[in-house]
Amino acid sequence: MAGNACIAFRGVTKTFDGLRVVWPPLELEVARHAFVAFLGPSGCGKTTLMRMVGGLERPSSGAILLEGEPLGPPDRRRGMVFQSYSSFPWLTVEGNVLFGMRYRRDLGPGEKRERCRRYLALVGLADFASAYPNRISGGMRQRVAIARTLAAGPEILLMDEPFGALDAQRREQLQLEMRRIQGEDPKTVIFVTHDVEEAVFLADRVVVFSARPARVVADVDVTRVLGPARTLAVRDGPAFFALRNEILHLLRGLQ
Amino acid sequence: MTAAASVLGAVALWQAAVILGAADPVFLPGPLQVLLALWQMLADGELLGNAGISILRVWSAFLLAASMAVPVGMLMSSYGLIGAALEPLIDFIRYLPVPALVPLAIIWFGIGETTKIFLLWLGTFFQLVLLVAEDMNRVPVEYVETSYTLGARPRQVLWDVALRAMLPGLMDNMRIALGWCWTYLIIAEIVAADSGIGFVIWTAQRYMQTARVMAGVVAIGVIGLVTDQALRGLHRRLFGYLV
């Protein structure tokens, strides 16, 4: 187990200005290449947990281990995708993806262009390489951010409600894409969301948190129930609904 | 169209007032007289030389102030301690009226070029610092955090992302600050100069050459208008991605 744990929370707590955000001390392990959703009510502290993994916040006590090593400040190993569209408006779509590799000295210009092409194709933006973010839709901008983060080559992908601002159709489309990308280019993913359906559809495992302070109330192995393939047929099936309802009831019981 | 019509209307009214004798041409010469004076000043080379000197003064002081304000403003925004330490001081200085400091400037620097550059710098630097800090505060925190998780170091985040993100706002503020420079320049040139447009205007006033005074004022307006439009055009060209 220890060798398989990519990220390990060891007695992690977080307090903001005397307000407990994560309590009691969190013990949690995330396996390599697992797609884990952190699910919980808005403002429950799940984003804080994810930001701590990213190195953007520090635990008040305890430690987060990455491959057994304590985490330091943010670096390229832990890529982030934010809820708001964080693609840079002054760069084209291609420029944004290339920016993801700007600080990689190990890649030559040719390799960077090649990777850029690959990730643009992966998120379906090959035809929009020379467009500026302000001229494309919100969903496309979010795909730019995803491609940029993937191009940097992180081991861990941290996503904070990345599809929160999108309409239902684009959201579903990006969820399917996210699953496909994970199949082609597997990463350890922590996906923060307050949407039960999204969590169940996307993740291999859903960790359900209580309202603040965040405490694990359930840890659901979705893949054991639904299997690894996620298609629209799975989404419309009875097993998906049963699991979704179970978690919904669990969340309702918390309030 | 509307703008051109309103300007033409105002000029026509002005000319009519002079022709009908409603205004004494000694105090209010008509637009034609002003235009004639402008032409004469252009023809004898007086205007071009002095305008050139004024433009040179404005731009040297402006570039000096801007090149100092950008790093200081960015530092103030990135480090809370520096910001908290400098802000009261800057707030105090930026409320001091520049004309009130002219005597002090003359005592310190005499009546040479240094005084003029100093006065213009004084009027713009402290205002610009706060505007730059404000521009940087508006850079979305996601841009900064994204860059860190892409492996950027603090200095790279500053150069490659923060500066780049704030550039459009920064350039707008610079354009406005350049306008202030002209105000302070005329004050400086009226008080202590033997060249420049301000000097030309002041000299003409002494001999009651009202048309020449107004021609000088018009010349400043034209220079301001041309510069402003050029900078706006450059802004559109550089930051077209925002549209």
Image (cartoon, grey):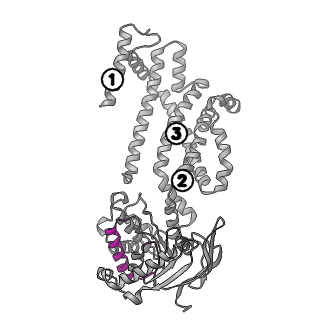
Q: Is mark 2 on a helix, strand or loop?
A: helix
The residue under label 2 is B136
**Cα–Cα gap, marks 1 and 3:** 29 Å
Q: What element carries label 3?
A: helix
Q: Is mark 1 on a helix, strand or loop?
A: helix
Q: Is residue A174 magenta?
A: yes
Residue positioned 50% across, 84% down in the render: A219
Most extreme residue toward the top, as rendered?
A: B21
**Cα–Cα gap, marks 2 and 3:** 17 Å
Q: Can residue A154 be seen in this view?
A: no
The residue under label 3 is B177
**Cα–Cα gap, marks 1 and 2:** 42 Å
**Left or right of A102 on screen, residue A132:** left
Q: In which quarter of the image is residue A169?
A: bottom left
Q: What residue type is labelled 2?
A: Met
Q: Is residue A209 visible?
A: yes
Q: Where is residue A42 in the image (x, y as percent from the top left)?
A: 49, 68
Residue positioned 62% across, 78% down in the render: A24
Q: Do the residues labelled 1 and 3 touch (CB within 8 Å)?
A: no
Q: Are marks 1 and 2 in contact (CB under 8 Å)?
A: no
Q: Where is residue B163 in the image (x, y as percent from the top left)?
A: 51, 55
Residues rendered magenta in the picture? A166-195
Q: Quadrant of residue B231?
A: top left
The residue under label 1 is B8
User: Can marks 2 and 3 be said to lie on one chain?
Assistant: yes
**Left or right of B102 on screen, residue A120:** left
- Sort mark 1 into few (<14), some (14-19) or many (20+) by Cα contacts within 10 Å: few
- Sort mark 3 into few (<14), some (14-19) or many (20+) by Cα contacts within 10 Å: many
Residue B92 disc label: none
Q: What residue type is labelled 1?
A: Leu
Q: What residue type is labelled 3?
A: Ala
User: Can marks 1 and 3 be said to lie on one chain?
Assistant: yes
